[in-house]
């Protein structure tokens, strides 16, 4: 699709100047790679990388009782966190399917800031708006903020060079300023590495990107595209909406039940999810550590040695860290860790072993 002013990030011109390979992500023109996925992936694992993820959604829920309202909608329990903390959660439908997974930031009992996925921002806002009682306002802020992710072992040094706060706990955020402009500094990310996500005003995002590129140079850091973001998250076994989570794949199936407040009185999809959790009759997510030669892709069939079909690959890629293929798959409950399986990759059998992710060991919460 052609890029237009409504579907390009505030850093779009920088991507073009760097010669980025661009592609459509949920209607947004975003960079897949600059110097190459492997080089960008390695920069993040070993040094530091900079991602533009401004296509991610943003929304604000505010008004008296906003915290309780959101808590009654999404899966995770906002009662577990305090002001200044962030939390991974899911927006489910009445059948327990995942409409979206998102991060919620607790600003106060009357203000919750949300970062949904780009494709689902409007639907999440619609669902909340329809359910909101009088006095609760749901505001779509999709293009009010940019989002820049600084990820990797040297991420603290890069932010420190710009006078931005570092060292706060994982899944917390700080309301800061840079060059006199407000920027939210979140200790979050999607790579498994130590890192931060920065939310400046949309109009200030380009200038902050430029400053971060300069600040990364002493550490041999590099801009990284969404291709590397995908290989990094797959190595960690992180779910991607549309692959490991969907309206057909529930938190029970995806093993994201840790982000469900099972003891809460209510949330969207609670009854269906409790019934599924109790029944234990659905496929569930596993990692596949490839032992043969081949790269699994979504949709590949997974079989036992005798040819019995036991599942389907949901995500698959070449792992630059390990130098081989890795995958995530929905498998029958008969599968256990350590099982040898066969993946049908375009008609060719590729051997793999069932494994619980992550595939690589990093210290995300350090």
Image (spheres, rainbow, N blue to C red):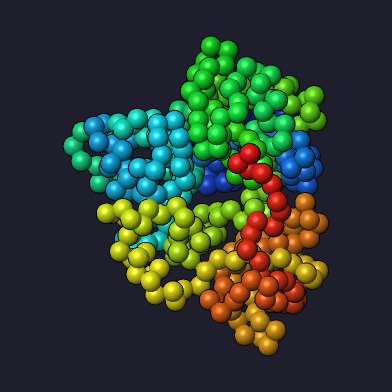
Q: Can the viewer see residue 70 in this picture?
A: yes
Q: Quadrant of residue 341?
A: bottom right
Determine whether 325 is above or below 186 in the image.
below
Observer-nearest of 60 and 267: 267
Q: Where does the image place residue 299, in percent across and percent down from the top left? A: 61, 68
Q: Please identify the residue farthest to the bottom as the structure is shown.
A: 306
- Going by the picture, which residue comes out furthest to the top? 180
Instruction: Kindly identify the residue that appears in the image at 60 percent across and 20 percent down.
Output: 164
Which quadrant of the view contains residue 39?
top right
**Which image quadrant: the N terminus?**
top right
The location of residue 339, given as percent across then percent down, is 67, 76
One can see residue 199 in this view: no
Q: Quadrant of residue 159?
A: top right
Which residue is at the front of the view, 300 or 64? Answer: 64
Rendering coords of residue 124 (x, y %):
37, 46
* Residue placed furthest toward the left: 134
Residue 254 sits above or below residue 278 on the image: above
* Residue at figure coordinates x 55%, y 41% from the top left: 28
* Vertical comparison of 53 with 91: above or below: above
Q: Residue at x 75, y 74 (%)?
A: 351
Left or right: 53 in relation to 273 = right
Quadrant for the C terminus, please: top right
Work out whether residue 320 or residue 27 is closer to the camera in this orientation and state it. 320
**Residue 279 percent across, percent down from the top left:** 39, 75
């Amino acid at each position: 699709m052609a890029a237009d002013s409504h579907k390009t990030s505030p850093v779009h011109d920088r991507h073009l100047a760097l010669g980025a390979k661009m592609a459509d992500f949920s209607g947004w023109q975003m960079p897949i790679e600059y110097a190459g996925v492997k080089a960008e992936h390695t920069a993040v694992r070993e040094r530091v990388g900079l991602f533009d993820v401004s296509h991610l959604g943003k929304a604000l829920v505010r008004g008296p009782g906003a915290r309780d309202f959101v808590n009654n909608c999404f899966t995770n329990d906002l009662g577990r966190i305090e002001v200044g903390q962030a939390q991974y959660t899911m927006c489910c439908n009445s059948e327990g399917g995942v409409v979206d997974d998102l991060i919620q930031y607790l600003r106060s009992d009357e203000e919750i800031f949300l970062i949904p996925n780009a494709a689902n921002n409007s639907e999440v806002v619609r669902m909340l708006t329809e359910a909101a009682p009088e006095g609760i306002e749901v505001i779509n802020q999709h293009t009010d903020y940019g989002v820049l992710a600084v990820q990797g072992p040297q991420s603290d040094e890069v932010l420190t060079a710009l006078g931005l706060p570092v060292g706060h706990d994982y899944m917390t955020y700080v309301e800061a300023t840079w060059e006199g402009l407000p920027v939210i500094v979140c200790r979050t990310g999607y790579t498994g590495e130590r890192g931060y996500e920065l939310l400046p005003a949309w109009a200030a995002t380009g200038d902050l990107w430029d400053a971060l590129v300069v600040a990364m140079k002493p550490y041999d850091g590099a801009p990284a595209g969404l291709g590397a973001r995908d290989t990094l998250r797959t190595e960690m076994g992180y779910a991607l909406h549309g692959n490991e989570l969907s309206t057909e794949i529930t938190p029970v199936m995806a093993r994201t039940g840790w982000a469900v407040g099972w003891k809460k009185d209510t949330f969207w999809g609670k009854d269906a999810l409790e019934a599924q959790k109790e029944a234990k009759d659905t496929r569930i997510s596993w990692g596949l550590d490839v032992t043969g030669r081949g790269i699994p892709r979504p949709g590949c069939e997974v079989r036992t040695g005798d040819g019995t079909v036991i599942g389907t690959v949901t995500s698959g890629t070449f792992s630059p860290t390990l130098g081989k293929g890795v995958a995530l798959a929905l498998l029958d409950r008969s599968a256990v860790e350590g099982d040898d399986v066969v993946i049908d990759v375009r008609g060719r059998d590729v051997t793999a072993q069932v494994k619980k992710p992550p595939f690589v060991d990093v210290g995300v919460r350090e």
